[in-house]
Image (cartoon, rainbow, N blue to C red):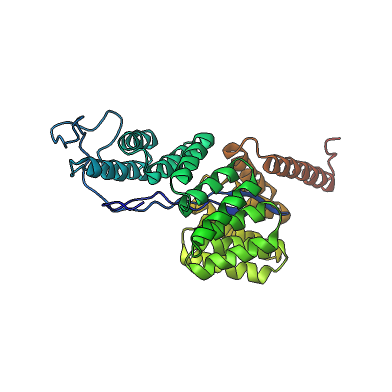
Amino acid sequence: MAVGWDAIYLDCIRRRTVHCFRAAAGALSVLSAFAAGPAYGPCQEVNPAGSATAATPSPSGCSKQVEIVNPTAEGLVASLNRRGVAYEARGELDCAIREFDRAIELKPEYAALYDNRGFVYQNKGDVDRAIQDYDQAIRLEPTDARAFNNRGIAYYGKGQFDRAIENYNQAVAFKSDYAKAYYNRGDAYFSKGDLARAMKDYEEAIRLNPKIAEARCNRGVVYLRLGDLDRAIAEFDNAIQLKPDFSYAYNNRGSAWNAKGEKGRAIEDYSEAIRLKPEYAEAFDNRGAVYADEGQLDRAIQDFDEAVRLRPDDAAALRNRADAYTKKAERDRLAQISRGKPGPQ
């Protein structure tokens, strides 16, 4: 649909990369979404006639963000859309939804508004309402690659990987250079265990946009799963070069070094992942596992304690901590016997 103003879309990739545990790659996690649009000045509340009222403060609970400068109906919709995008970028999701609601009331036939509101609902965890909005965006704009991509992410979040792939297929059909959609589809194939197709999609995403660090990281995980440790490390190196604060890439590279028997380098990478992301439970668990393998059981238990504190239901960390305590008790018992004192029976 042609419009007389610049449309701003909330467009995203699946926020995910793969963390690896000691024995195998673990759950997939999410990476930051992408939102487009210029920065604007302070927001002003709008009166029912649509004119900007400078003396009226922004609504309670919402920070000032985007000024509405065009009092025409079309300009008001454009400004509300921009303001919703700006609120989303600041994490003020309820405020963003309110702005998109108001814009939709004024222009219910504009697909991008539903796409954007769906994106915000998805960030709030209301996946079903997000899908409803993506459905409406697609009904209004059947070739909207962004809406298909975002709906694919929503279905992925529900564990419906095949439906996610169907939507990513549509996204790349309508936008053949859509690197984010190839990356997202690669994640869906990865979750289905189809490493060959995942690899192909990550490679296409990288070809289209060589600066997608997440695609390089996940391609490294595929190499790690295939046992090609040197190529995995090379991909994690590439990801870190593109994104120096990429905690997941450090964690994954640590797992590759561990698999190669390079325990010291593994600990260095896990420690850097923790420095970058202090709440990174998997990195604590992974580093603890290496300490345990090295016989540093007290340090291992400290790391497992922190992993469990961060994620109390983490079965791997709980199991690893129990194993470490068992090994420590046996080591202490043998030490007492070697000193001529009977250990606990």
Q: Quadrant of residue 53?
A: top left
Q: How many marks?
A: 0
Horizontal side, residue 47 vs residue 293: left or right: left
The answer to whether 276 is drawn above or below residue 59 in the figure is below
Percent position of residue 270, x then y? 58, 56
- Front residue (pair 81, 232): 81
Q: Is 189 located above or below residue 80 in the figure?
A: below
Residue at 65% from the left image edge and 49% from the top image edge: 162
- Across and down, in percent, residue 210 comes to 49, 69
Residue 18 appears in view: yes
Which of the 4 image quarters holds residue 236?
bottom right
The vertical placement of 266 against 167, above or below, is below
Identify which residue, 237 or 127, lies in the foreground: 127
Q: Position of residue 10 (x, y in %)?
A: 40, 49
Nearer-the-camera pick, 341 or 331: 331
Image-quadrant location for residue 99 = top left
Image point (61%, 51%), residue name: 166
- Of residue 255 and residue 284, the one placed in the foreground of this image is 255
Q: Position of residue 127 (x, y in %)?
A: 53, 37
Q: Residue at x 83, y 41 (%)?
A: 341
Q: Please tell me which residue is depicted at 31% across the width and 38% down the height of the picture.
A: 103
Q: Is residue 265 visible?
A: no
Apparent side of residue 25 relative to residue 137 in the rendered image (left or right): right
